Image: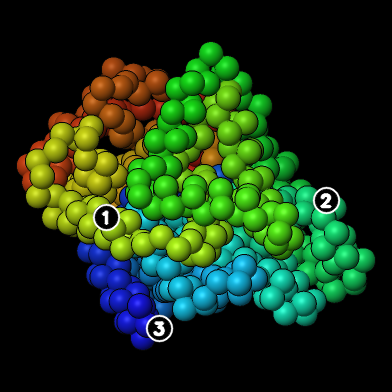
């Protein structure tokens, strides 16, 4: 494939992803991140702030709509693909391969479900993958040119990757272990330009560290606390979920190519010293996730930190990748069609797209029609509260995570509480049902139903419950 064919194809994919981003309703987590973007700060309870910053930029450019929330996603995938392409060219040179095969890396990466679907939505993984691609490209430049100034770009990429999601620290740990365990790495440690890159990363992550330091380290503790979970009797099941999740998100044939590329890299580690760096950057995250799976569930999207590097490594293989890319693109296309049009009448349990995105605009309208203007609406579920606010229904978020947002509003004591129909309001009084049941629907199918309760909040909850910014 020529360069012009590659970029013509990827630009076409970008247009499709933009159209899909504009068409699909937001998922609850995307609406939650949109709430973050209403009050930018150095960190949040669940994640670092990059996803909120990207949404803020996108909505400033395009408007307060689904495309505005997601618009930077397809473009970040396109820019990241360029970085992976250039990175693969440097990697092929290091191994003495023909650089004309570098197009394989961005094709493999874009044919995965995680990139195909993830680039049309907005999650912390979206900027994470871009900035890791930048960091890996800069590392390839370090090895290919021997010019230390590229360490500044390495620090820039890894630092902003950490500002996107904390798992970016794992490939950084791999680079550090390469630095102390190999002759090439120790040679760089003795040069000041390496530490200049380290300083650049430190500057990039300082706002996140400072926010945590001034907020009881809450975000670090929340994410780092997962490492303490330990249920070894379920280890076999967790391992199976980890493997199955990666095969599903990467697609089976591309997953096989990724594994084959890493295996080939392992065999070349003695004859090509630079290959050791790539082994560390891929191996360190993989070992951490395998260790975690011995005691707790590993979310399927966590290992995305190694996908750009795996695509680069696989690009140096001499095997054909046409079938793998075709299968991945077909599966992604089928997922696009189901997400946009829901042609298959799947059950709510089976249709993840309907469960996450179906019926939110109409649901917000139905809720608005049932709540008097002078009665506060209280919503315990953070995702439902965020969706309602995004689609124009003022709501009070009743979740402790709201206390970590800087924007605050007056408190209330009484109001209508919206909870799932199969649950009861756990505040006093709990028996006063108000109005009828309202359901979120997709093509007349009930996705989930909710009830209204007349409640009085305990005084302790009024200290933090009204921290949800309202849409203007």
Q: Earlier in the sequence, mark 2 or mark 1?
A: 2
- Which residue occupies 15% across, 34% down? 347
Residue 456 falls left or right of residue 308: left
Q: Is residue 311 above or below residue 381?
A: below
Image coordinates of residue 462 in percent, x first then y, are 52, 35
Q: Are marks 2 and 1 in contact (CB under 8 Å)?
A: no
Give the residue number, with chain letter if any, for mark 1.
327
Instruction: Report helix, strand or loop for mark 3.
Output: helix
Question: In front: 275, or 402?
Answer: 275
Looking at marks 1 and 3 on the same chain, the residue that comes earlier in the sequence is marked by: 3
Q: Residue furthest top?
A: 233
Residue 217 position by quadrant: top right
Q: Which mark is residue 181?
A: 2
Local crowd size for mark 2, using a 10 Å CA cut-off: few (<14), some (14–19), many (≥20): few
Q: Which percent across, then down, holds residue 66?
A: 31, 64
**In this rendering, position of residue 460 left or right of residue 174:** left
Taking the view exactly as shown, the residue that stands out farthest to the left is 444
Q: Quadrant of the N terminus?
A: bottom left
Q: Is 231 or 7 nearer to us in this picture?
A: 7
């Amino acid at each position: 494939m020529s360069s012009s064919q590659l970029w013509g194809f990827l630009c076409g994919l970008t247009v499709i992803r933009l159209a899909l981003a504009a068409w699909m309703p937001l998922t609850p987590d995307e609406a939650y991140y949109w709430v973050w973007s209403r009050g930018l700060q150095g960190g949040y309870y669940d994640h670092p702030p990059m996803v909120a910053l990207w949404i803020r930029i996108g909505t400033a450019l395009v408007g307060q709509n689904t495309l505005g929330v997601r618009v930077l996603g397809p473009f970040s995938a396109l820019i990241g693909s360029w970085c992976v392409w250039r990175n693969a060219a440097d990697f092929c040179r290091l191994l003495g391969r023909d650089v004309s095969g570098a197009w394989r890396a961005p094709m493999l990466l874009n044919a995965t479900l995680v990139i195909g679907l993830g680039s049309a939505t907005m999650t912390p993984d979206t900027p994470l993958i871009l900035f890791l691609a930048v960091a890996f490209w800069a590392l390839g430049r370090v090895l290919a040119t021997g010019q230390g100034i590229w360490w500044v770009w390495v620090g820039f990429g890894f630092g902003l990757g950490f500002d996107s999601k904390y798992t970016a620290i794992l490939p950084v740990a791999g680079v550090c272990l390469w630095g102390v365990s190999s002759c090439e790495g120790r040679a760089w440690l003795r040069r000041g330009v390496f530490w200049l890159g380290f300083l650049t990363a430190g500057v990039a992550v300082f706002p996140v560290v400072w926010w945590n330091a001034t907020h009881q380290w809450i975000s670090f503790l929340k994410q780092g606390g997962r490492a303490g979970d330990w249920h070894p009797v379920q280890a076999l099941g967790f391992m199976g979920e980890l493997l199955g999740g990666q095969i599903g998100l990467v697609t089976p044939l591309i997953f096989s190519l990724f594994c084959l590329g890493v295996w080939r890299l392992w065999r070349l580690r003695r004859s090509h010293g630079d290959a050791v760096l790539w082994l560390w950057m891929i191996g360190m995250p993989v070992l951490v996730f395998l260790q975690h799976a011995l005691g707790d569930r590993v979310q399927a999207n966590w290992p995305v930190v190694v996908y750009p590097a795996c695509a680069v490594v696989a690009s140096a293989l001499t095997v054909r990748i046409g079938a793998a890319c075709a299968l991945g693109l077909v599966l992604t296309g089928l997922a696009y069609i189901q997400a946009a049009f829901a042609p298959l009448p799947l059950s709510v349990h089976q249709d993840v797209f309907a469960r996450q995105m179906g019926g939110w605009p109409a649901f917000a309208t139905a809720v608005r029609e049932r709540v008097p203007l002078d009665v506060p609406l209280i919503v315990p579920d953070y995702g439902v509260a965020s969706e309602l606010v995004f689609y124009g229904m003022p709501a009070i978020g009743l979740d402790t995570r709201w206390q970590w947002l800087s924007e605050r509003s007056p408190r209330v004591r009484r109001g209508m509480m919206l909870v799932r129909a199969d649950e009861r309001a756990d505040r006093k009084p709990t028996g006063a049902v108000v109005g009828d049941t309202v359901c979120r629907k997709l093509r007349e199918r009930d996705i989930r139903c909710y009830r209204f309760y007349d409640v009085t909040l305990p005084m302790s909850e009024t200290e933090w419950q009204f921290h949800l910014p309202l849409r203007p």
